[in-house]
Image: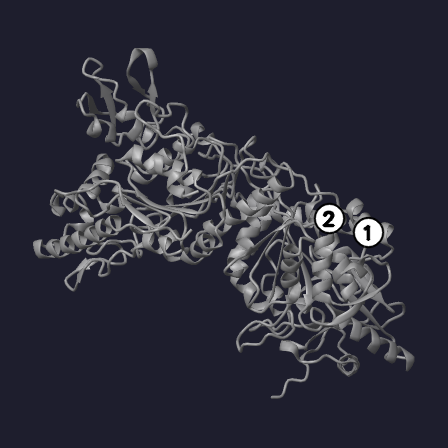
Amino acid sequence: MSSINSTKPVGIEVSLAIAEAVKLAEVEVVAAYPITPQTHIVEHLSDLVANGELNAEYVPVESEHSALSACIGSSAAGARTFTSTSSQGLMLMAEIVFIAPMLRMPIVMAVANRAISGPLNIWNDHSDVMSIRDCGWIQIFAETGQEATDLSIIAFRIAEDKNVMMPLILNLDGFTLSHFIEPIIFPEADKVKKFLPPYETSHKLDLNNPLSFGLLGGPEVYTEARRDTDLALLNSRSHVQRIFDEFAGAFGRQYRLVETYKTEGAETIIVTIGSISETAMSAVDEMRAVGEKVGLIHIRLWRPFPVVEFRAAVAGAKNLAVVDRHISMGFPEGPVGTEVRALMYHEKERPRISNYVLGLGGRDVTRNHFKYIVEQVKSLGADKRQGGYEMVGVLE
Amino acid sequence: MNKKVDIVMEAAFKISDLPLGFTAKPGTTRKFKTGDWRSARPVLDRAKCVYCGFCYIYCPDGVYRDMGAEKYYQVDLDYCKGCGICAHECPKKCIQMIIEEV
Amino acid sequence: MKSAEVQFEKITPKTFPKGPDSLASGHRACQGCGEVLALRLLMKALGRDFMAVSATGCMEVCTSPFPQSAWEMPWLHVAFENAAAVAGGVDAGNVILRRKGKLPDKRIPVVAIGGDGATADIGIQALSGALERYHENFIYICLDNEAYMNTGIQRSSQTPFGASTTTSPAGSHSKGQSTWKKNMPAIAVAHNIPYVATGSPAFHLDLMNKIRRAAAIPGPAYLHIYAPCPTGWRMKAELSVESSRLAVNSRIFPLYEVIDGQYILNKKVDQPIPLVEYLKPQGRFRHLMSEDIAKIEERVNHEYEYIVKLSESFVEPLF
């Protein structure tokens, strides 16, 4: 792995690249369960520990539930902590996911987004992470291998920031990103050391200052405790952008809370999350080439939602075509669609909002899907408020 | 807040009162006096006491204090819940549970 | 070094630690709670230089209503079934920070504490995983009050045969709990850990020295502690220590240690008191007829003799 010290791109599987980035972050405890289903992220981390390349404790727990439980323990001990999961594993650990933010434990968790059962399916969509949407973690989506690598380092810097102190989920699409080999430029180790100093905190289990963590909060304080966590999460938004900017200053790659692509003069803006944004960009290029006024927005920071940035990015559009990779059963829309609609409802210049659910359980999403969506938006009636909703490609 | 409608404010803490991570300082339950749970109090006959310490050892609430040179253990009624274990376990039967007057 | 040879500072009547408790007064445990008594003695034996992790349950709820805590050492509670996993994580954190020089070069015991439900039922997977992973400074304490008391006395796998609980009620078609207590110490022993022991608050020096030994021996330890619950057992509050004593002396809760696989019976009970004397003060057994008690007594004697036989057979430690 000596080649990763080069500033030239290296062809590497994205899961392995994330593990290498976590090594560069000098993580101290990794507790993970390798199945349900998993990626090569933690396998490679255990290799790095076994080879002496990473001075860390690797805790091979017996379940995802225990994985995050052990992570809370090691983070509470004051150690920089990482885990990785997906799909059923995230479902199993969900109970603990909701507890970590209140404890303000800056754990970083990579989630290789995959479908949840049933039926059993290990392929990509966003139904795992959308099911824990309200958990209180900072949630970021990576769209490429390079982003996943960079964000794996940035994640610790954000989570451990004195003004933030929140756990962070780094989402990357299972298989379509996690298992692909991509050319990746690794941040130089010495620069990473400067960008991400060792984790030092007084917010920990300390024999010299023995705090109690995880108290009972009765009706007289539960509401305030929940709102306190909510405010901490909301407050992290500006710090996320500040740290993205600092990363850009050090490494030259700039990330934004909401990324825009060819939105200038766009009448219809497609809204995506995750790696399909890359496909969508190609589709936008092709549509733009034949005169379609189409643009793209991909949401990088999912929680806390970048409300201001999102509204600014869609200003002037006549139509939003919001893509969901998760079905919200019993409601005529996917979660991203619903949130976008809620955010725009009170805007003076309100675009017509349509929602398309596609790419469930590993079903391919091609450029044609985005062209189809734009065709659907164009064929909507004259009523400016009446958007469409469709599960794209479903055979009835 | 709409002042026209009264809502019951049950909250005892403001968000600004809450410590980072909802923690507590050690041993702070001492601020909560459990003595008013008691319906009977232990009364020690010091003449019979042999300073064996079983009242101190077996108290679930840790309410007995070692009086050292005076060679007995004194109950702290701020916390004593009146369970009666000390009286039951005393080998010299020199602790009596006396019903509290209301 | 054999675990049995590991030295530790023994507590005697003369050296009984008289300083302030490590578990503060003002906690909200019921009157006469035997569980909080056992916990208080165990914490007192360890002092304050350790870290504690609690499972959700009576001892967690009654000691930590915001903004107060009864714990004098660093303490962490996360959820019901994961105390062992959390404690394993704390230990991993301490181990790496010590290796990196961020913590003093000294072992820090990490003590996970759970009730019988948190240990033997919902948390058994996390416990098994933690014992198997062999965390070096890990001690697990099961405070066994033989049912889910915090939530209203529902039966667990540790509820003894014949006990009436809110989910194993005695009735015209039921004698109460219809199953026998799951043998948790044996399950812990099966993980090939260096130290397993049972303890009882009535035998306080035995109890306190067991956790001291557990802390001194490198590797995981499991302590199964008898924890009388006057509320759940429908028993007078003053009888907690008495019932702890009767449980040992009637053989229903034998005191033993298992060091590197070798069973050691700590208190031989050659002349057991009749089991009925143990059962009678407890309302949960009130419905039992003499033939039911005879059946239980037979089983109790059999299980006790089994421990005796194990303690009489020498086991050459594998490790």
Residue extending furthest top? Answer: B69
Image location of residue A386, percent across then percent down: 71, 75
The vertical placement of C172 against C272, above or below, is: below
Q: Is residue A178 in sight in this rendering?
A: yes
Q: Is residue C236 in sight in this rendering?
A: no
Query: Tag 1: residue type?
Result: Phe
Crowd tier of the residue under label 1, counting other residues whose Cα lies within 10 Å: few below 14, some 14–19, many 20 or above: many
Please check whether the numbered discs 1 and 2 fall on a single chain.
Answer: yes
Image location of residue A109, percent across then percent down: 64, 57
Residue B21, quarter of the rendered image: top right
Q: Which residue is mark 1?
A: A247
Q: Which residue is mark 2?
A: A157
Specify the subunit that label 1 lies on: A
Please, what secondary structure does the residue beneath circle 1 have?
helix
The vertical placement of C85 against A8, above or below, is: above
Crowd tier of the residue under label 2, counting other residues whose Cα lies within 10 Å: few below 14, some 14–19, many 20 or above: many
